[in-house]
């Protein structure tokens, strides 16, 4: 299975360079909105195109949610920097009318995609709760079940490194690279964005690794 993973878009249209016919899966890791330089109209148009791209390729395209997306989907909760009040009237209904097209995690075997990543210590804190859920045994399915529940705040905790005041570590949309580097979830190969990095880089070994892709490049991988 050939996969291309796309890091934080923030309004950029570079994803349109991709030829989807070359891949079995096209996975966006979230943060479609909020930008230092893209105008509101262009950002909205780009998100509409991404949503249509998903609708046209339901089985191929995966749209994950990032911290900049959930602040509009779940407004007024989960606010973060970059929030554009002038876009709320457009983005709140757009995200919610298309909520079924988005998810918080995606998994193939022991390869796991989230926006910011899962650290061992964050997962251990909620391990018993994860085990109690009705979803099948994959971590991704349980994360997505939580995302649609009243306990979704668990996923969006902001750790102290990112300015949070209540939690030591960030959840799957907020974990900083310093929280997952050397502490990524045992037994999984994670692909994450969120923390800008100079170039796509993988850390780990054959059993446990994490690849950071918040760059302007795209990450191609293959799962046999």
Image (cartoon, rainbow, N blue to C red):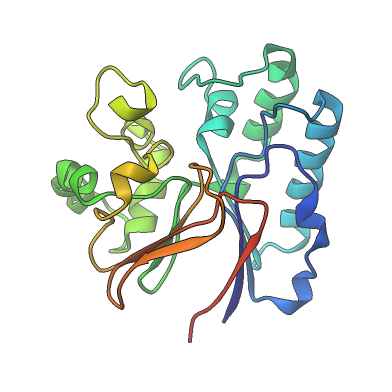
| Residue at position x 17%, y 49% in the image | 127
Residue 70: x, y in percent? 53, 31
Residue 103: x, y in percent? 52, 48
**Residue positioned most to the bottom:** 224
| Residue at position x 48%, y 42% in the image | 195
The answer to which image quadrant residue 43 occupies is top right
Looking at the image, residue 167 lies above or below residue 183: above
- Left or right of residue 37, residue 167 in this image: left
Count of numbered circles on the image: 0
- Left or right of residue 218, residue 42 in this image: right
The answer to which image quadrant residue 99 occupies is top right
Residue sitting nearer the eye, 197 or 104: 197
| Residue at position x 61%, y 19% in the image | 83
The answer to which image quadrant residue 5 occupies is bottom right
Q: Is residue 149 visible?
A: yes
- Left or right of residue 207, residue 141 in this image: right
Residue 90: x, y in percent? 75, 23
Residue 193: x, y in percent? 51, 49
- Left or right of residue 145, residue 183 in this image: left
Residue sitting nearer the eye, 4 or 205: 205
Q: Is residue 159 visible?
A: no
Looking at the image, residue 83 lies above or below residue 159: above
Q: Quadrant of the N terminus?
A: bottom right
């Amino acid at each position: 299975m050939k996969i291309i993973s796309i890091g934080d878009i923030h309004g950029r249209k570079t994803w349109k360079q991709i030829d989807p016919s070359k891949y079995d899966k096209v996975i966006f890791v979230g943060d479609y909105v909020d930008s230092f330089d893209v105008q509101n109209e262009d950002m909205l148009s780009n998100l509409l195109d991404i949503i249509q791209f998903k609708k046209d390729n339901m089985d191929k395209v995966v749209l994950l949610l990032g911290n900049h997306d959930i602040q509009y989907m779940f407004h007024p909760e989960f606010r973060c920097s970059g929030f554009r009040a002038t876009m709320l009237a457009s983005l709140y209904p757009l995200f919610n009318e298309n909520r079924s097209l988005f998810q918080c995690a995606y998994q193939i075997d022991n390869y796991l995609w989230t926006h910011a990543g899962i650290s061992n210590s964050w997962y251990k804190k909620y391990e018993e709760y994860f085990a109690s859920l009705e979803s099948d045994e994959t971590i991704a399915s349980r994360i997505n079940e939580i995302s649609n529940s009243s306990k979704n705040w668990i996923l969006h905790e902001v750790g102290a490194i990112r300015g949070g005041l209540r939690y030591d570590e960030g959840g799957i949309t907020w974990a900083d690279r310093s929280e997952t580097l050397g502490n990524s979830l045992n037994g999984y190969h994670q692909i994450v964005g969120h923390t800008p990095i100079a170039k796509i880089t993988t850390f780990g070994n054959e059993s446990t690794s994490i690849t950071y892709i918040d760059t302007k490049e795209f990450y191609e991988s293959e799962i046999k």
